[in-house]
Amino acid sequence: MDVGAAPARSARAGAHDAPWFPWALMAPTLIVLLILGVFPFLYSLYLASTNIILSKPYLETEFVGLYQYHELVQDRRFLNALKVTAIFTFFAVFIEFWAGLGLALLFRRRIRGKAFFRLAILLPMVLPPVVVGLTWRYLLYPHSGLVTYYSTLLFGFFGLPAPQFLSSPDAALQTLIMIDVWQWTPFMFLILHAGLASLPPEPYEAAEIDGASSWRVFWTITLPMLKPSIMIALVIRTMDAFRTYDTIAVLTKGGPGNATETLNILLTNIGFGFFNISKAAALSFIILVIIITLSFLFIRVFAKKQLDEA
Amino acid sequence: MDAKTRPQRGCGLKAAASLAALLAFTAMPAAAQTERQKALAGATVNILAVQMPQYAPLWAQIPEFEQQYGIKVNLEEASFDQMREKSLLDMSQGTGRYDIFTVDVMWLAEYVSAGYLHPLTQYVKDPELTAADYDVDDFLPRIYSGNGMWDGAIYNLPIGAGVTGHVFRKDMMEQAGLAVPEWYDKSWTTERFMEAVEKLNNPDAGVAGYVSQPQRWFWGWTFTQLMHAFQTDETAGDEFVDENWNVTINSPQNLEALKWYVGLAKYGPAGSANFGYPEMLSLYQQGKAAGALMYTEFVAGDLEDPRHAEISGKNIYLHTAIGPHGKIDPWFGSWGLGISRDSKNKEAAWTFMQWITHKNQSLKALKGGTAPTRHSTYKSEEAKQYTPHYVGIYDFMLNTTNPDTRIRVPEWAEISDVMGLYGNQAWLGEITPEEALTNMESEIKAAFRRGGYYREGAKNPPQLWRDLSVYDAKPSSWK
Amino acid sequence: MSMTQPLPVSPSAPPRERNWWVYVILLLVSFVALVPIVWIVLTALMDRAVAQSVPPQWIFTPTLEAFETLLTRYDMLLYMRNSAIVSVSATFFSVVLGMFCAYALARYEFPGKNDVAFWILSNRMLPPVAVILPIFMFFQTFKLLDSLVGLILLYTGMQLPFVVWMLKGFFEDIPRQIEESALVDGDTWFGAFRRVTLPLMAPSITATAIFVLILSWNEYAFAVFLTGAQTRTLPPAVASFIGGSDIQWNLLGAACVFITLPILLFVVAVQRQFVRGLSMGMMK
C-alpha cells in the first residue's frame, strides 16, 4: 500500500511540496466529517454515561459511569443479539465472497452474452434495501407469496412439509442470510471481477509454461494477487452486513422470538422502542468497538501479508 | 380506492370536496365563524397522522375545512410502525414541526407525563374557538375521557374507538354443524371457543380453525385481552400489578391464559408464529381460516369493504370469549388528536380539531368506515346502514369498556414489547409458559424501577382501572 | 495501465466448446437474480385481486391502476424530485471533496497518514440508528430539519469515507512520473492534476460516483426522521405502504418500480463505464 515511499522530488518546487499541502487537500473532507462525526460521538459518549430515557424527561439525570455497559454485557438479549449478528455476518459474507469470486472467475472465460449476464447479476444490488425487504416479504408471504406457493408445491410433490421461511427461528435467520446473499453477492462479484481484470498476464504465462494445474494457479497466483480487492470487498461487506437494518426491519423486525434480533435491531428497539437512549448509546459504542476491531484486523492481516510477500 | 377514502391530494379530492361543499350547503347549517376564527385565516397546521384506512374518510374532508376557514392543513402520514418513534423523537426535541399528532390511547400516559401535549379543555370551553353546536357531551363519556384523560385533564380528542373481538365465517360454522353465537353471547366461552375452533380446523382442505397473530409486536393486544378474561373476581384488576405496583403478571390466572393461547397454535395454519396483523388478515381474507382476531375499527376497511367481495357479508362478529370464571375482556382502543406543546398555532390547530370531530364530519366519515365516538353517530341511521357492526358495541362502550385494559402508565410500550418477546418464544416452544411469565415479570419490574416507581416517596399514577367511575364523568365536566 | 484492452482471459481457460456448464450456472444465477424483480414489476401492473391470487397468475390483463392511485393519492413526483436533488448533489459534493482527500492519502507521506485514513473509514462504521438522535439535535440547532440542504450535507458526509477509500486505491495506481513530468514542464500543481491525473482517473471517478449515487438514492433510516411532508424522499414514502393493515401489493409493487426505475435505467445506461472504471485501480 506504500506507493510513494521514496519520492523523487525532481519536479519544480512549489506549494505542493510543503508539508501542509496534503492536509490542505484533505481539509474539506475532514471538516465535513468532523462536523457530522464529532458532535454525535461526544454526545453519545455523554449519553452512555448517564441514565436518560428520552420519553421520561421528568426523571432526574444521573451520572452512572460504566453502568450501562455493565448492564448490557450481562443482558441475555445483548448476548443473543451478538450471536445472531455474528452468525448473520459470517455466513452472509462467507457465501457472498465465494459466490462472487466464482462468478467473477466464470466471467474470465470466453462466453457470449456477457453484457446481459453482468447486468442480470448486478441488478439486485441496485435496489433500495427497503424495496428488497418489501419484495421478499411479498414473495415469502404466507400462502399467496410466489416463493411460498411454488416451494410448497415442490416440497409437497416429494411428500415433505411446506418449508418455513420466516416463521421458525432457524429458518428465519437462514432466510435473511440468503436474502442478503441475493442482494450483495453482486457487490463482491463487481469488486473481484474488477480486481481480476487488472491482474497482469505475466504470472499466468509463466504458470502455463510450467504446466501448473488451474487449481494450483488459482491458489498460488490468482488469490494472492487479488488480495487488495479482496480486502476492500471484505471490509466494506463485513461492515455493512454487520449493520444491516432496512431489510431485517421490513421482514422480521427481529422475530420470531428474538431469532433475528441483530445488534442493530436490538439497538433500534432500545433506542426507539423504549427511548432508553443512554443504554442505546452504550450499545452503539460496543458495536463501534467490534466493527473497528474487525476492520483493523482485516486491514492489518492483508497489509502484513502483502509486506511479507513483497 | 373510491373517492371518499382518498386523503387530501389529487383529483379524487376535487370530487370529494365538491360533494362535501354540496352537503355543507344543503344538509347542515353552515357553522358561523367567530371573529377569532376568522383571524386565524392564513395559518398553516401540520399534522403527523398514522396511516390507517379507517381514518382516510376524515382526512378526505380537509379541503372542505381549508375552504371554509382559510387555514391550510398539511397532512403527513406515517405508518403505524413509525408513528410512535417519529412522534416521540420530534416531541422530545421540541421542534414544533407538527401542531397535531394522532395519539393512540396506549401512548397517552407516556406523551403527557413527559409534558409533550397541551391540555384541551380551555379550548373546548372557549365559545370563540369552538362551534356552538359542538356538544362535547355528545361524546360517550368513557370514549372521551378514556381516550384523552391523564392526571385529571384532557389531552387527546377522540377520532375513533373500538373493541376487540373475533370474526368467524358464518358459512363455515354452519357447515361444521356449530350453533352460530351472537355478539355478547353469554355461552361464548373460552371453552366453547376452543371446541369450535377444533371442529372448524380442516388442514386437509387447507382451512385452519383460527388464525391469530402471535408475532412479537402484537402481544399487548392479543394477550392482554386473555389476561383479563381469565381473572377471577378476586384477582380482577391485578392483571399486571397489584395496588402497590408489585408486578403480578406471573399469576396462576395469567399462566392459564397463556397456556390456553399457546394451545391455539395447533388449530392455526402451519408456521404462523411470525404472523402479524397483515398476515393474519390476508389468510382470513382468502378463506384459509375460519376465524381470526379482529378489532372493530378495522372491520369496515379490511373485511366489509366492497373490495373484499369474496368474504364480505359472510362474516359474523363476536366479542372475545368469556373466561373460565365468567370474566369478559373489557377492551378499549382508540385514537385521538393531540396538540403539541411546541405548536405555534395552537388555536388554528384546535379550530381544525373541533371541526373534524364535530358530529357533522363524524357522520360523513362514518359512511367511509370511521368508527363512531358520539351518541348521535352511534344511534344514527347512517351507522345502521353503513357500519352495522359498530351499532352492537354502543352499550359496551357506554357501560363495560375499561379504558385501562392496557394499564395507563408511561411504561406501556416497554411492557408490551416484553410480553411479546417472551410470549412469542413460548408460542414457538423455545421456553415454557412458566418461564415466559417469569421473564416478563422481571423485565416489567425493571422497567418500573427505571421509571422510579419503587423509590421512597414515589408519586405513582392512580390505578383507575379498579374504579371506572372516574371515566364516567360528563365530558363537559372535565377541567 | 491497459484500460482499453479487452479483459485478459486466463490462459488456463478451457476452449469454448467445453463451456456449456458455465452457461447453465450463469442462466441459473440470472434467473434467481431476476425473478423477484420481474415479479414485482408484474405485480405493479396487476389489479388488487390478481396481486394476491393463488396460484400466482403470470398471464393477466395489465392495468396502470396502481400507478394511477399512487400518483393521485401521494405526491410521488415531489418525493422523486427531492430524491433526485439530494442524491445528485450529495454525490457531486462527496466525490469532489473526497477526490482531493484520496489524492493526498495516495500521493503523500506524512506522519499519521494511516491513522487519518482509518479514522475516515471509521465514520462509516456506526449504524445510522446510533447517531440519529445527535444528528437530529444538530439539525434542529442549525435549522436543517425538513430541508434538502441538511440531507445533502448528511449524505455527503456519509458517503465520503467510501469515496476516499475507493479513490485512494485508484490514485495509487497512476504512476507519479506522469504528473511529475507535467510539473517539470512548468505546469502548476492544479494544472497538472487537472490536465493529467483527472483524465486518467475519469473512469474510476465515474464508477465511484455511480456507487455513491445508488447509496444516496436508497438511503432510508435517516430520511424517515429528518424529512417532512415537503422534503420526503422516496424510500420512507415507499416504506409507509406496509405499515397499514391490509397491504395492497400492487400499490407496493408500483411504488417499488417507481423508486427503482430511475436508478435502474441509469445503471443500465452506464454499466459499461461502471465496470470499466472499477477494473482500473484494483491492483496496487
Image (spheres, coloured by chain):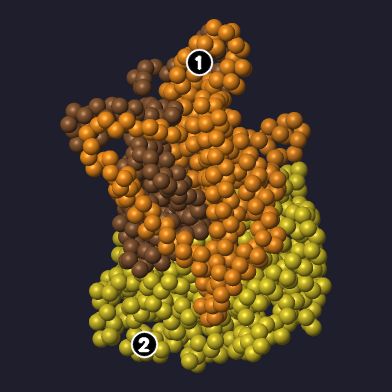
Chain colours: A orange, B yellow, C brown
In-front residue for pair C191/A273: C191
Q: Looking at the picture, does residue A45 appear above or below residue B186?
A: above
Residue A132 seen in the figure: yes
- Residue C97 lies, in percent from the top left, at 31, 46
> Which SS class for mark 2?
loop
- Residue C30 lies, in percent from the top left, at 52, 27
The amino acid type found where label 2 is placed reads Ala
- Residue A96 lies, in percent from the top left, at 57, 34
Quadrant of res A63:
bottom right
The crowding category of the residue bearing disc 1, from other C-alpha atoms within 10 Å (few below 14, some 14 to 19, many at least 20), is: some
Q: The residue marked by circle 2 belongs to what chain?
A: B
* Image position of A202 (left or right of B235): left
Q: Quadrant of the N terminus of chain B?
A: bottom left
Between label 1 and label 2, give the one nearer the viewer.
Answer: 1
Residue at the disc numbered 2: B132
Q: The residue marked by circle 1 belongs to what chain?
A: A
The crowding category of the residue bearing disc 2, from other C-alpha atoms within 10 Å (few below 14, some 14 to 19, many at least 20), is: few
Distance between the alpha carbons at the discs numbered 1 and 2: 91 Å
Q: Residue at x 46, y 41 (%)?
A: A127
In-front residue for pair C186/B331: C186
> Which SS class for mark 1?
helix
* Image position of B182 (left or right of C130): right
- Residue A89 lies, in percent from the top left, at 60, 43
How many marks do you count on the picture?
A: 2
The amino acid type found where label 1 is placed reads Pro
Q: Residue at x 44, y 27 (%)?
A: C283
Q: Which mark is residue A203?
A: 1
In-front residue for pair C143/A119: C143
Q: Looking at the picture, does residue C277 appear above or below residue C137?
A: above
Q: Which mark is residue B183?
A: none
Q: Residue at x 70, y 60 (%)?
A: A76
